[in-house]
Amino acid sequence: MSTFRFASTALGLLLILLLGAPAVAKEGASGPRAVLAPPTVRIISGNPLTIHVGADQTFQVFNAAIPGQGQIYPTNSGAGTADMGWFVRVGSTLYAPDFEEHPAGSATGGLGTYTAFTNPAISAVSGSGTAADPFRVTVTGTVPGANLTLSQVVEYVNGNNYFTKRLTVANGTASAVTARIFLGGDIYLAGSDSGVPFREPVSNSVGGQECVPTPNYTILFIPQSPADAYAGQGYSTVWQQIGTGQLSSTLATGCIDNGAALQWNRTIPASGSVTIQAATSFGAIPPITQFNVSAVTPASGAQGASVPVTISGFGFQAGTTFSFGAGITVGNLVIVNGTTATATLTISPTATLGPRDITGTQSSGGLTSTLVNGFTVVAGGPPAPTATPVPTLSPWLLVFLALGMLVLASIVIRR
């Protein structure tokens, strides 16, 4: 080898080590580059999961069971985030995180043309990591040109192998907006960029499993709000489907460089909002894929009222119960099938006003699910009693009564 070629090769290897190239070269991967405005990242240092949350609605996750390996490509994203996040499509425009600003590079070229979210902001990490006080990060941003705002709450409880996220899309216009919302990622299964696409049938969660005869590691996108479509395909195919605005609801076969995504089709009312809840798990398939409360219709009731409701979710069975909190009695409960229940709520006239969580408990195994702010108590109920009006007397009648009293008094005195 010539001295020149040797020096060039050595220089190239040195640059790769310094810049931290992705572990596996991918078609369409941008690779590390000089970054002008990388997203601010908050790190939830939990156990077993360490979750990186980006201000641009992106993620990277590390699992203590697989030390040093990010579970989303590019796996070497260090203190940053990777190719996983939220997307919003309005009309023919796709709005997405600005993956090109990620220091570790990106392999999201299959998305095609998109407009990046704007005005990103992110809170500090709060909470202690317990079930009563989860670790929590709030991320906000805007969808430019569509007058939509995003607000995401990410939560994690120590000991769980999954974390949850709740994305609210608010409409600032006087007209309804139709949108398609996606959550997707290029998954990196237990230190390998290859996996077998997989769908969990009870919850329609989608993701991938290890390329071994008996897999024990799974990454799943879990739709706690029922999804309208899914995809478990090669990573580039997943990006292409998000880019064109429709997931195929199919799984590829074989051991491939895979990704996964979920899709929700929503109409956001004028001056209103919609909320999507989802989770992502790493390792064993978690219990939340077997039981979940996703919605209550109607979602509000007045103090003092009796309100028939329909409860939606999955994993419902005989003996499943639901609690709406203090001041609300759940009666006439009927489990219609595995995804639907009906009940009559009796709301106390003194029930506390405002939103409240709904907790469901499955009969066997004691699985629980909480729908955050799933029902709202509003003012109302029986009208307050009104005082009986006192009849008024005309002035002339009062004069005649006074004269009558004087006449009666004079008669009594004469006697």
Image (cartoon, rainbow, N blue to C red):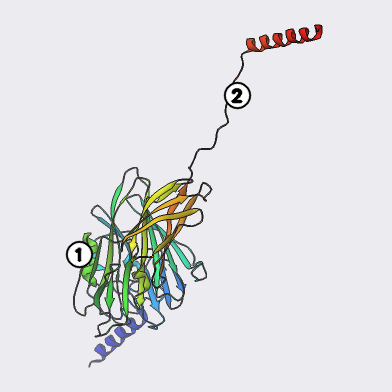
Which residue is rendered at x = 42% and y = 76% of the image? 49
- Reply above or below: 133 against 346: below
Q: Helix, strand or loop at disc 2?
A: loop
Query: Is 131 left, or right, of 229 in this rendering?
Result: right
Residue at point 43% right, 52% down?
345
Q: How crowded is mark 1: few (under 14 residues within 10 Å), some or many (20 or more)?
A: some
Left or right: where 267 falls relative to 377: left
**Quadrant where the image shows the N terminus:** bottom left
Could you tell me the amino acid type at mark 2? Val
Identify which residue, 407 or 365, lies in the foreground: 407
Task: Pick out the residue farthest to the bottom.
Answer: 1
With 143 as the anchor, is 252 left or right in this view? Answer: left
Q: Distance between the residues labelled 1 and 2?
A: 73 Å
Mark in front: 1 vs 2: 2
Label 1 residue SS? loop
Is residue 382 placed above or below 334 in the rendered structure?
above
Q: Which of marks 1 and 2 is nearer the N terminus?
A: 1
- Rendering coords of residue 195 (x, y %): 25, 79
Residue labelled with disc 1: 248
Residue shown at the point (38%, 74%) measured from the top left: 61
Residue visible at 51% across and 46% down? 349
Residue carrying label 2? 390
Residue 148 in the image: x percent, y percent?
A: 35, 51
Q: Would you say residue 330 is visible in this rendering? A: yes
Are there few (<14), some (14-19), or many (20+) residues within 10 Å of tag 2? few
Between 8 and 107, the one lying in front of the other is 107
Whether residue 104 is situated above or below residue 116 in the rendered picture: below
